Amino acid sequence: GAVVSQHPSWVICKSGTSVKIECRSLDFQATTMFWYRQFPKQSLMLMATSNEGSKATYEQGVEKDKFLINHASLTLSTLTVTSAHPEDSSFYICSARDASGPTDTQYFGPGTRLTVL
Amino acid sequence: EDQVTQSPEALRLQEGESSSLNCSYTVSGLRGLFWYRQDPGKGPEFLFTLYSAGEEKEKERLKATLTKKESFLHITAPKPEDSATYLCAASAGGGNKLTFGTGTQLKVEL
């Protein structure tokens, strides 16, 4: 149980293009999903919290117009990196909180490696 | 400000050599203390949630414990497949956010 998928697992794009990453909770409903970014040999950096049916809450320093987040259903959240540039290259990981569970436990997806040329 | 600190940063063990990883936390109103395992190029894999001081949880060769200031992840007779980065995180207050430590990179050698 508690499986989270991400698609794609890796993507290479040209500078200036937009990239969409999907995050799905496969066997549970997630009212809250989270998007993280991870640089090599560093821990996870929370970018934003996504609540189903409402606007995402972004962490300080994260550009909401650049990283568009949509949480349209209880099992799907998307992150769109708009007008991507090489400095946006990173490992993006989503997580989902099981709405039916008693805890704050977040279950993570496998991550998406984005490379911007 | 909530803080989570893990030590050591890196640990090298021989197969069968038991040890412990430390996670110290300073948060206001701990709701839960979480341990994850992360392999290179993959997302974190959930291991344990601890809620209150004195609580212990076990899974195979791993046992997590919690005090009012820190948590330990004990690894008994580790195997090479236990090699990974172990992340500790805390949730506190009224929000759902996790504050992560920087992790302990564990390598178990034959």
Image: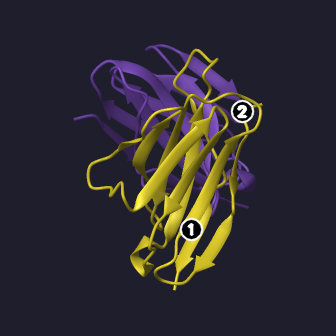
Chain colours: A yellow, B purple
- Which of the image's four quarters has the C terminus of chain B? bottom right
Residue on which the image places disc 1: A19
Q: Which mark is residue A2?
A: 2
Q: Are marks 1 and 2 on the same chain?
A: yes
Q: Tell me the SS state at disc 1.
A: strand
The label nearer to you, 1 versus 2, is: 1
Residue B95, image x, y percentages: 38, 25
Horizontally, residue A87 falls left or right of residue B37, namely left
Cα separation, mark 1 vs mark 2, equals 26 Å
- Which of the image's four quarters has the N terminus of chain B? top left
Identity of the amino acid at label 1? Val
Q: Is residue B67 visible?
A: no
Task: State the residue at coordinates (64%, 31%).
Answer: A74
Say above or below: A26 vs A23: above
Identity of the amino acid at label 2? Ala
Front in this rendered view, residue B107 or A56: A56
The chain identifier of the residue carrying mark 1 reads A
Front in this rendered view, residue A88 or B34: A88
Q: Is residue A21 visible?
A: yes
Residue B24, image x, y percentages: 35, 35
Q: Tell me the SS state at disc 2.
A: loop
Residue A37, image x, y percentages: 46, 57
Horizontally, residue B51 falls left or right of residue B70, namely right
Say above or below: A61 vs B61: below
The chain identifier of the residue carrying mark 2 reads A
Task: State the residue at coordinates (69%, 63%).
Answer: A8
**N-terminal-most mark, 1 or 2:** 2
- Circle count: 2
Horizontally, residue B101 falls left or right of residue B21, namely left
Task: State the residue at coordinates (60%, 58%).
Answer: A21
Task: State the residue at coordinates (67%, 25%).
Answer: B58
